[in-house]
Amino acid sequence: MGSAENSQHAIRRSTRLPLEVPVRVTSMAHDFAFSEQCNTTLVNAHGCGLIAPASIVKGIQVRLEIVSAKRHTTARVAEVVPLGGEPETFLVGLELDVPGNFWGIEYAPSDWKVEDTQEPVPQPTTPEASPPLKPAARRWRLTDISSFACYLEAVSPFPVGTPVLMSVRSADAEFLLDGVVQVSHPNLGMGVAFTRTADLRERVESLIHQLTANREVPRIFVGKKEVVQSDAHPVSDPESLDPLLELLLEGAALSAEQFQNDLRAQRLGKRRDPRINIVLPVLLSGVDASGRPLDQRVITVNISRRGALLEGIHGELAQGAKVSLARGTSKEEFRVAWVEDDEASSGARIGVAAVDPNSSFWDAVLNATSESGLEAASLRGTTAND
């Protein structure tokens, strides 16, 4: 077997994860000058694939640096493939000189555990000093999953807003899913809303089919993503009526106990709160992402007892921001659960959840609809002063 084949085998002998990390690659060869900012496309414990703006000499040693994390190591150029284009770019395969979790993924796949071959950390010599404790590895248990979200039990979940990459392995198959932590409960777990991608539904449905068919406990690995694409957003598909995603998006308004009770109810097929499609004008007040005040009339798309989908938002609102809604004599505070950018003149959509879990803001409408037996569409003429 030739050296190129050996190199390819070495790079692929641990699980590869699709991860975009900005790195600086600098040639260590005296007869070849190269130093460029590049982006990885795949990483593992033994190397990476990255896109370079210029060709690199195959076989030379390079210095590989993650500038933002102040980490660097050395590697060998194992492969160079021209990708064409104008200007031309190149796919470069690098093999790390010292395999390990150079990429800083907090809970990497089990076959990345090659760091044990490295030299041990020196122990302190002073009697009063004690060696730093190594953080306990996180263990994840997948308890709930839908087409757009999942819930993972864990003692030490990641904080809300953390972008994550999940690897779910069942039988001989592996499924990679990007997402953002929407709710986090210490000593209990966290809820992840999957990031919107073209083939998301297909991949998740394949995973659910695999889990159902094999009836085995999947192996779960979850790592923080160091870089988040600017156009990556959690899935927000209110028309899908996905109860799990809806619960995660409104989870900030619930205590951990209330959330867990609602999660258990969903497993039994019970909906927490009825949601009706209804168009109502409401007054929204708040402060946008630039610190400017917002006071505008928007309309609902649907409502539930503790939340609503609103559209016609003109102004940038950040996820987690608080806004006030007013209708007639009622006024309450809500938290922005998610934001869906919309370039249309009608404005953006946002999902909001009541700050008060015992909110009564929509009670009059919900009760009137329930008692009258009228379809929600018949209330389209209701005004903000009713």
Image (cartoon, grey):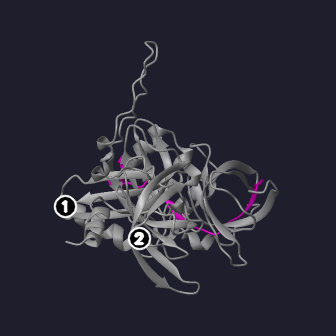
Q: Which of these two is toward me, 166 or 68?
A: 68
Which mark, by number, is residue 200? Answer: 2
| Among the 4 quarters of the image, the one containing residue 338 | bottom right
What secondary structure is found at the residue carrying circle 2? Answer: helix
Counting from the top left corner in percent of width and height, residue 261 is at 40, 43
Q: CA distance from mark 2 to mark 1?
A: 20 Å
Q: Is residue 371 left or right of residue 194?
A: right
Query: What residue is rendered at 42% in x and 55% in y?
Result: 271
Q: Write down the region rendered in magenta.
A: 264-288
Residue type at the position of mark 1:
Ala
Let me know if residue 162 is in the magenta part: no
Mark 2 or mark 1, whichever is nearer to me: 1
Q: Check residue 267 for magenta coloring.
A: yes
- Image position, residue 3 (x, y; %): 27, 69
Q: Residue furthest top?
A: 127
- From the viewer's perspective, is residue 204 above or below residue 352? below
* Residue 45 appears in view: yes
Side (left or right) of 347 relative to 353: right
**Residue reaching furthest front?**
31
Q: Tell me the element at label 1.
A: loop
Q: Which mark is residue 78?
A: none
What residue is shown with label 1?
Answer: 171
Q: Position of residue 240 (x, y in %)?
A: 46, 69
Q: Position of residue 67 (x, y in %)?
A: 58, 53
| Towards the viewer: 117 or 228 | 117
Q: Amino acid at mark 2?
A: Leu
The quarter in which the N terminus is drawn is: bottom left
Which residue is at 49% across, 57% downward?
63
